[in-house]
Image (cartoon, helix red, strand yellow):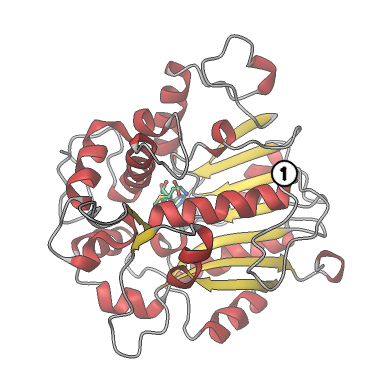
């Protein structure tokens, strides 16, 4: 199992910073799900991307780490005897955003019908994954043809990812799919090294062939709670200015109340040491909607994960932290927003 230090360093992994290593953790949760006979989804690259140490760490965590809130969305012990298998938050969020991404890019006709609004858009052909980490959707999802898929993250993460993908026979361009072990479903995956704490990342995107006049699906999953408030505001604002009508932003957002209450946990401390004050989505939801508006986005959906779970995975049981804190209305949002440009709101 990897050794984590108090100041956010990982001693025995190529991903030396805890903030990078979190990409291994969520990949490990997907790898463990993939192994289940009744898996919600199967991610053929998750295990190699996560590596053995993070997989062992998450496996141990899900088997019964004593402190409930520590495991956050990684999940809690699966309770099989006499009951259904339970799934953790990463699995719920993966499934929710798989559907949202497919709906926005034309791989699915509609978003969940339980949501009051749905995405009735022209299929979006450019996807930008902000803090893409070791996510393998371009090799896993049944994407519509012709999608350019940009993956932005820190240098050490993208370097390790490229190496693993190459060794696994997973190409970055569909033109190279012949004979590949795991063909890519996007037309091209383009990695872009960035630190979101620094300005100027849209420039790097444009240099890589991104078209800021066309609609874009921006997606930030598990990113914002590792950034400072300034960086989150800048990323959202710059994204809204760097895309054409019909653009969508989807994201997970850990709420400010949850951050405040759970900040004593080891995971949270490691996050905080890297990025001194992590951003939490303002609660109640109206405040997050107002914040998004100030950044150029109109929120279409803002769903609490615990409320979404039964709709996302009907018939399953969940291991999600309860609303156990007095006054805590929400702890983790799934957000879908449309660019405020009048043409882009359907
Ligand atoms: C929990 S992981 C989520 C990865 C991926 N979205 C997923 O769900 O599998 C958080 C990711 O955000 C990236 N990240 C955190 N802070 C960042 C920053 N300042 N600049 C660029 N990427 C950052 C990390 O390197 C890591 O890959």
Q: Residue at x 17, y 39 (%)?
A: 2
| Whole-percent x, y for residue 170 in the image | 52, 21
Q: Residue furthest top?
A: 179
Image position of 128 (left or right of 105): left
| Whole-percent x, y for residue 325 in the image | 28, 84
Viewer-closest of 141 and 110 = 110
Tell me: residue 23, above or below residue 90: above
| Whole-percent x, y for residue 162 in the image | 47, 27
Tell me: residue 4, above or below residue 265: above
Q: Quadrant of residue 190?
A: top right
- Residue 167 in view (yes/no): yes
Q: Residue at x 63, y 68 (%)?
A: 114
Q: Residue at x 73, y 42 (%)?
A: 210
Rendered-image quadrant of the N terminus: top left
Viewer-closest of 201 and 168 = 168
- Residue 200 in view (yes/no): no
Q: Quadrant of residue 110?
A: bottom right
Q: Residue furthest front?
A: 82
The residue at which mark 1 appears reads as 126
Viewer-closest of 77 and 215 = 77
Viewer-closest of 271 and 317 = 317
Q: Secondary structure at mark 1?
A: strand
Tell me: residue 140, above or below residue 166: below
**Would the CB of label 1 be found within 8 Å of ligand 1?**
no
Q: Residue furthest bottom?
A: 327
């Amino acid at each position: 199992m990897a050794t984590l230090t108090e100041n956010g360093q990982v001693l025995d992994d190529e991903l030396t910073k805890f903030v990078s290593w979190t990409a291994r953790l969520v990949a490990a949760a997907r790898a463990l799900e993939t192994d289940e006979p009744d898996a919600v989804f199967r991610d053929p690259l998750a295990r190699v991307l996560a590596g053995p140490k993070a997989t062992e760490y998450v496996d141990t965590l899900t088997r019964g780490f004593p402190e409930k809130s520590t495991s956050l969305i990684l999940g809690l012990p699966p309770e099989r005897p006499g009951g259904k298998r339970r799934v953790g938050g990463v699995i719920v969020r993966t499934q929710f955003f798989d559907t949202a991404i497919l709906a926005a890019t034309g791989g699915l006709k509609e978003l969940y019908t339980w949501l009051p609004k749905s995405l009735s858009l022209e299929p979006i052909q450019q996807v930008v994954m902000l803090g893409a980490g070791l996510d393998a959707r371009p090799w896993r999802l049944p994407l519509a043809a012709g999608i350019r898929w940009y993956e932005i993250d820190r240098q050490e993460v993208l370097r390790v990812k490229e190496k693993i993908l190459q060794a696994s026979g997973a190409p970055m361009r569909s033109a190279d799919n012949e004979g590949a072990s795991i063909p890519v479903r996007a037309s091209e995956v383009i990695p872009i090294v960035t630190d979101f704490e620094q300005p100027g990342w849209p420039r790097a995107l444009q240099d890589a062939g991104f078209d800021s006049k066309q609609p874009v699906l921006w997606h930030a999953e598990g990113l914002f709670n590792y950034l400072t408030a300034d960086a989150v505001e800048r990323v959202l604002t710059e994204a809204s200015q760097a895309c054409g009508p019909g653009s969508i932003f989807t994201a997970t957002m850990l709420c400010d109340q949850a951050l405040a209450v759970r900040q004593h946990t080891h995971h949270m401390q490691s996050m905080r040491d890297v990025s001194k004050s992590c951003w939490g989505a303002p609660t109640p939801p109206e405040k997050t909607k107002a914040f998004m508006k100030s950044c150029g986005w109109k929120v279409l959906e803002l769903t609490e994960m615990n409320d979404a779970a039964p709709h996302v995975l009907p018939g399953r049981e969940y291991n999600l932290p309860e609303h156990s804190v007095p006054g805590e209305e929400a702890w983790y949002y799934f957000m879908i927003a449309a660019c405020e440009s009048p043409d882009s709101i359907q």
